[in-house]
Amino acid sequence: MQAHATVARESTSVPTGRVGVWWFLASEIAIFGGAVACYVLFRARYPDWADQAARTLGWAGAFNTAVLLTSSLSAVLAHHAAVRGEAVRASHMLRWTAVGGLVFLAVKVYEYAHEISAGLVPAQSLFWSFYYLLTGLHALHVTAGIVALLAVAASARRGHALGRVELVALYWHFVDVVWIFLFPLLYLSS
Amino acid sequence: MSDAHPSDRFAVLVWAALLAALLGSLALGAFVPTTMVVVWVFAVAVLKAGLVLYQYMHLKHEPRWVRLVVFGSLAVVAALLAGTIDDIVVAPGRL
């Protein structure tokens, strides 16, 4: 028997919390998918956006991609630890995941400062409007994820509600998947 | 994520594969002609997202209906994209 003892409902064969997170993520796919689809359409319409994309800080985007991929690893290790009933290790891994999120946000703030000082603001062109919309929306999700990670880490440390480790890890992986697509679309399509 | 969990070592291997794919994307951006790079880099992104979805989120162990929820949502987005591509990319100005 697993330490976190999440119970699957007969009607769905999946624990209710996990069903809720998957439904939530499906709605998030519609939100991000719609915004990304709009960007892709206009990017195809205006090939000269490549010049704008070339002005993004590619190294920062690549570094942030590595940071998020690494934080996804710590999230999955936290989940594995929770399954084994290792509450303290699960809590530690979630905190490392949150640290990854904080590093990501710090780099993003640096990027924004660099771009704004160069006059690359949302009103500059439609490309930069999309850039700030997509990366800003993603950064909001990262921020929410950090809050959720720290809250679950605190309860996990006391051995409470270890089943939530899996749920918050699912959300964090989704945030990672979104960035996996934003990085090539906004940074590498130049 | 299901109850059939792979080991920590396997998770680290997946992470290494994801980082290798990231480096591959950067190399493609540096060496492949511009017209082709978008397609290749996006293909690598799909590969990376698949790894995270199937290995880290354990989507492969979820019931079929959960996969339908996820990919159904993607299908709706794809349908909207297909429905508007003509007005924006092919024959703009018909909005």
Image (cartoon, helix red, strand yellow):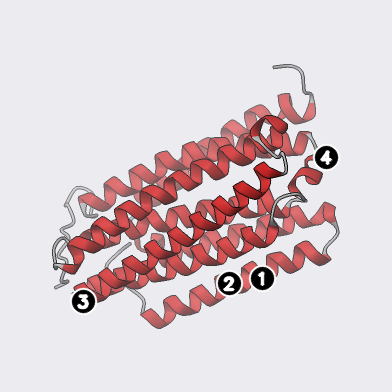
In the displayed image of the protein, which residue is found farthest to the bottom? B9
Kind of residue indicated by mark 1:
Leu
Q: Residues within 10 Å of mark 2 (few under 14, many from 20)?
A: some
Counting from the top left corner in percent of width and height, residue A132 is at 59, 39
* Residues at circles 1 and 3 in contact by the CB criterion of under 8 Å: no
Q: Tell me which residue sits at (69%, 58%) in the image.
A: A58
How far is disc 4 from disc 3 in space, using C-alphas? 53 Å
* Residues at circles 3 and 2 in contact by the CB criterion of under 8 Å: no
* Residues at circles 1 and 2 in contact by the CB criterion of under 8 Å: yes
Marking on residue B19 = 2
Numbered-mark total: 4
Front residue of B55/A102: it is A102
Q: Tell me which residue sits at (59%, 54%) in the image.
A: A110
**Which is nearer the N-term, disc 4 or disc 3?**
4
How far is disc 4 from disc 2 in space, using C-alphas? 30 Å
Is A92 displayed left or right of B26 in the figure? left
Q: Residues within 10 Å of mark 3 (few under 14, many from 20)?
A: some
Tell me the element at label 3: loop
Is A89 displayed left or right of B15 in the figure? left
Marking on residue A86 = 3
